[in-house]
Amino acid sequence: MKKFIVISILLGFGLMITLNSCKKKEEETTPATLTSTATIKGKVWAVLDATNATEEYAPSGTKIIVTITTQDLVDYTLDAEKIKTLSYETTLDGSGNYSISIPATSKIFTAKVNGVDFEYEQTVWDYTTTPTSTKKERKVYTVGQSIVNIQAGTVQINDLGYN
């Protein structure tokens, strides 16, 4: 009888140790810090002077925003509630150029590039005067979203044209 009790106690301890050592692996909510990047750069144009046939650069300081998701940065599927949107912002220089580096992996994924709307006093023809002259009119400039394929170590050129 003593042997039965001792064996039962040992089996009980063994079962407790086995059950306590089995833990569910918790999934990360955000990807580990990445050291690899990709660069998106380009020129941004807008017709600031409608009295000539050339497009000008969008004004210095105009914001460009690039968005990706945390799902893009991992090799496994995240639960929907764990997927987050990551946004990166830059501004144009005086020559209409922008450049932004974002985290990237060796797998190809897409990034969304958006120019922020801006208002400007556009030069237009004033046909109410004789001779015809020019005047300034407030205009709100918008640009559509661009989709760019991204991969670590690459540079993607993405020019934007405001309307």
Image (tube, rainbow, N blue to C red):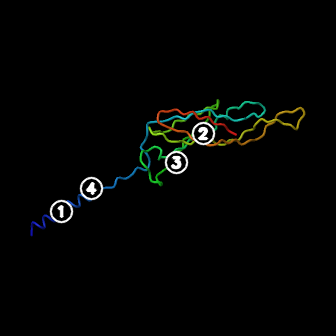
**Label 3: which secondary element:** strand
Q: Residues within 10 Å of mark 2 (few under 14, many from 20)?
A: many
Question: Residue 11 bears which disc, if any?
Answer: 1
Q: In which quadrant is the N terminus drawn?
A: bottom left
* Residue that protrudes farthest toward the right in the picture: 130
Q: Report the residue marked by disc 4.
A: 21
Q: Residue at x 90, y 33 (%)?
A: 130
x then y, percent, for residue 16: 23, 61
Q: CA distance from mark 2 to mark 4?
A: 50 Å
Where 144 falls versus 133 (above or below)? Answer: below
- Label 4 sits on what residue type? Ser
| Whole-percent x, y for residue 129 in the image | 89, 36
Examine the image and state in which quarter residue 43 appears.
top right
For the residues labelled 1 and 4, the Cα–Cα distance comes to: 15 Å
The span from disc 2 to disc 3 (Cα, nearest Å) is 16 Å
As drawn, the residue found furthest toward the bottom would be 1
Please report whichever mark, 1 or 4, sits nearer to the chain's N-terminal start: 1
Q: Earlier in the sequence, mark 2 or mark 4?
A: 4
The residue labelled by disc 3 is 85
Q: Earlier in the sequence, mark 3 or mark 1?
A: 1
Q: Earlier in the sequence, mark 2 or mark 3?
A: 2
Amino acid type, residue under disc 3 in the picture: Thr
Are circles 1 and 4 on residues that touch, CB within 8 Å?
Answer: no
Residue 29 in the image, given as x and y percentages of width and height: 43, 50
Residue 103 horizontal side relative to residue 94, left or right: left
The residue carrying mark 2 is: 64
Left or right: 122 in relation to 114: right
